[in-house]
Image (spheres, rainbow, N blue to C red):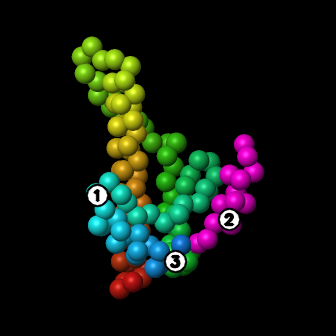
């Protein structure tokens, strides 16, 4: 594994500001509905991904993609290899969208509770 992808590199990434978040949100709202605006995650160990509060209050939300159970993979009768890859890709996309939605909802709930009006 290259040094460039170590924790040092992640720690050097610029922290997103609330303006970054709001701009990303505005862009996401104007873009096709697939795009979500999430803060830059950090890796919390054990495969967990941590999303910190953008106002740096100490709150964070963790997701562990490795612990998610894969959903059903739907295949047509007499499927070919391409169908299998497409079905797996689509199941993975659904899981990643669901995770993104959980993170957005957790952040929205935290802002409503801890930073009302922000
Ligand atoms: Zn906060």
Which-is-in-front pick, marks 1 and 2? 1
Establish if 54 lies above or below 6.
below
Q: Are marks 2 and 3 in contact (CB under 8 Å)?
A: no
- Judged left or right of residue 48, residue 101 is left
Instruction: Specify the farthest residue to the bottom.
Output: 117
| Disc with the residue nearer the chain's start (3 vs 1) | 3
Of the numbered discs in the image, which one, if any, rests on residue 32? Answer: 1
What residue did someone put label 2 on? 11
Distance (Cα) linking label 3 and label 1: 24 Å
- Judged left or right of residue 111, residue 46 is right
- For the point 52% across and 42% down, which residue is it? 66
Instruction: Specify the farthest residue to the left.
Output: 77
Residue 107 x/y as whole percent: 41, 68
**Magenta segment boundaries in residue numbering:** 1-15
The residue tagged with tag 3: helix, strand or loop?
loop
- For the point 40% across and 74% down, which residue is it? 23
Q: Are marks 3 and 1 in contact (CB under 8 Å)?
A: no
Residue 74 x/y as whole percent: 29, 28
| Disc with the residue nearer the chain's start (1 vs 2) | 2
Locate the C terminus by quadrant: bottom left
The residue tagged with tag 1: helix, strand or loop?
loop
- Magenta highlight on residue 6: yes
What residue did someone put label 3 on? 17
Question: Mark 2, residues whose alpha carbon is within 10 Å: few (<14), some, or many (≥20)?
Answer: few
Nearer-the-camera pick, 12 or 69: 12
Residue 62 x/y as whole percent: 51, 58
Instruction: Specify the farthest residue to the top.
Output: 78
Distance (Cα) linking label 1 and label 2: 31 Å
Question: Mark 1, residues whose alpha carbon is within 10 Å: few (<14), some, or many (≥20)?
Answer: few
Question: Mark 3, residues whose alpha carbon is within 10 Å: few (<14), some, or many (≥20)?
Answer: few
- Magenta highlight on residue 107: no
């Amino acid at each position: 594994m290259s040094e460039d992808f170590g924790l040092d590199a992640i720690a050097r990434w610029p922290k997103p500001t609330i303006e970054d978040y709001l701009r990303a949100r505005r862009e996401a709202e104007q873009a096709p509905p697939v795009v979500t605006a999430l803060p830059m995650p950090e890796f919390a160990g054990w495969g967990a991904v941590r999303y910190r509060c953008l106002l740096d209050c100490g709150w964070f939300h963790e997701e562990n993609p490795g612990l998610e159970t894969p959903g059903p993979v739907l295949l047509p009768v007499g499927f070919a290899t391409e169908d299998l890859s497409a079905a797996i890709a689509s199941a993975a996309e659904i899981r990643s969208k669901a995770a993104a939605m959980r993170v957005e909802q957790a952040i929205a709930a935290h802002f409503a509770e801890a930073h009302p009006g922000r």
